[in-house]
Amino acid sequence: MLELAVLGLLHEAPMHGYELRKRLHALLGAFRAFSYGSLYPTLRRLQLAGLITDESAQDAVQRTWNRRAKTVYKLTADGKERFAELVADVGPQTWDDGSFGIHLAFFSRTPAEARMRILEGRRRHVEERREGFRSTLGRASEQIDRYTLELHRMGLESSEREVRWLNELIAHERAEHEDPPSSGRPRD
Amino acid sequence: MLELAVLGLLHEAPMHGYELRKRLHALLGAFRAFSYGSLYPTLRRLQLAGLITDESAQDAVQRTWNRRAKTVYKLTADGKERFAELVADVGPQTWDDGSFGIHLAFFSRTPAEARMRILEGRRRHVEERREGFRSTLGRASEQIDRYTLELHRMGLESSEREVRWLNELIAHERAEHEDPPSSGRPRD
DNA sequence: TTCGTCATGTAATGGGTTACATGATTAC
DNA sequence: GTAATCATGTAACCCATTACATGACGAA
């Protein structure tokens, strides 16, 4: 997750850790927040793996005088490749709230085909969740306490809204790529 | 989190692990799902801590013949105390999506005062999130790409809805507190 | 000169998940 | 008699957080 986010952000421009974290916050809003305690170790790991390099490393003078200088990271060719891999590697955990947000945030660098798989997978995921709420509310509205009821009512409403939202996004995707719906059942 | 949920559920009735997990699912919907890989170790830990006991333990005959019998756990007095502690121990992490859902699910066993702190804390939390989205959308609507924009628009809308929902819950709490449904001593 | 913010990091820990392994019970 | 589901558990790992520690630098 963090790896994807870091590589994605460095696609825009070289940055140092502190900056990266602020951009991360701005980009992902409250969907996902990362702390320095995970960011810096990740940066080191990515550097060791050759996916990013310290752009300011050649500036040895500054290093000597300033034991705590900014370390500006930039993507390597391998890093770009890795990002492309991660962004298109769509699996069950991609549908999670947190993961989905990150993936969506990098959609402009995601191939159209992967975008579709992500949106549709997410929709299925949220639809299942929605059905869970529906059945709870339908089955036993009078046996569960007021608070649990509220919780599930809210959950149901949110799921319904998100499904509608996803439908719009999917429709837009289809329209943009002139890939008309083949044999789709009509969506609400 | 799991500890709170387990103790809370065992408040209702004694149960074994498998059952517990299903009830957990039913109670929390998709807000939080726990796997057996965390449930069983937790049960063991709680048992060692004396917060729950194996109700079927005295049934030594079954144990001997059946190496894999159901283990029905029930709350001890210490367990009830611990639950009361956890449910009223309101801190910054209580406002998280997952935590909040669990707390809400056990509101009927939560003192009114703690309920208020949780609801108001959650509201503040969501309001802050909302402001984050608002400023992103207001500040730079034209610099961010379509997808990030959608993400934040959705986030803003959800936050707004949740704040309204919380306001209603809070209003309801206040009304009930000032005007107790039964056994009411008159207002000052 | 001290305060706030920028900036980088580490150690300990947390709170789970996945995958796997096994056995018991029920329904067909 | 076998497939599904009920039921319990373990080992390995994952991905992060919290709390802490250090240090640079500009502004009041």
Image (cartoon, coloured by chain):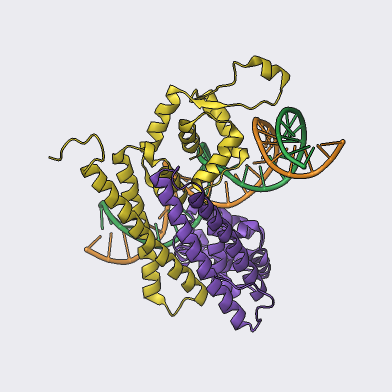
Chain colours: A purple, B yellow, C green, D orange
- What residue is at 67 percent from the left and 70 percent from the top? A77
Comparing B40 with B179, the one in front is B179
In the displayed structure, B64 sits above or below A63; it is: above
Q: Residue furthest bottom?
A: A178
Q: Residue furthest left?
A: B188
Q: Position of residue A8 (x, y in %)?
A: 57, 68
Q: Is residue A60 visible?
A: no
Q: Quadrant of the C terminus of chain B?
A: top left
Q: Position of residue B123 (x, y in %)?
A: 34, 54
Q: Is residue A27 visible?
A: yes
The answer to whether B58 appears left or right of B167 in the picture is: right
The answer to whether B179 appears left or right of B16 in the picture is: left
Query: Hey, which quadrant is residue B138 in on the image?
Result: bottom left
- What residue is at 38 percent from the left and 32 percent from the top? B84
Comparing D27 with B23, the one in front is B23
Comparing D9 with A108, the one in front is D9
In the displayed structure, B154 sits above or below B55; it is: below
Count of marks placed on residues: 0
Q: Position of residue B90 (x, y in %)?
A: 36, 41
Query: Hey, which quadrant is residue A185 in on the image?
Result: bottom right
The answer to whether B72 appears left or right of B143 in the picture is: right
Q: Position of residue B54 (x, y in %)?
A: 56, 23
In the displayed structure, A162 sits above or below B105; it is: below
Comparing B119 with A65, the one in front is B119
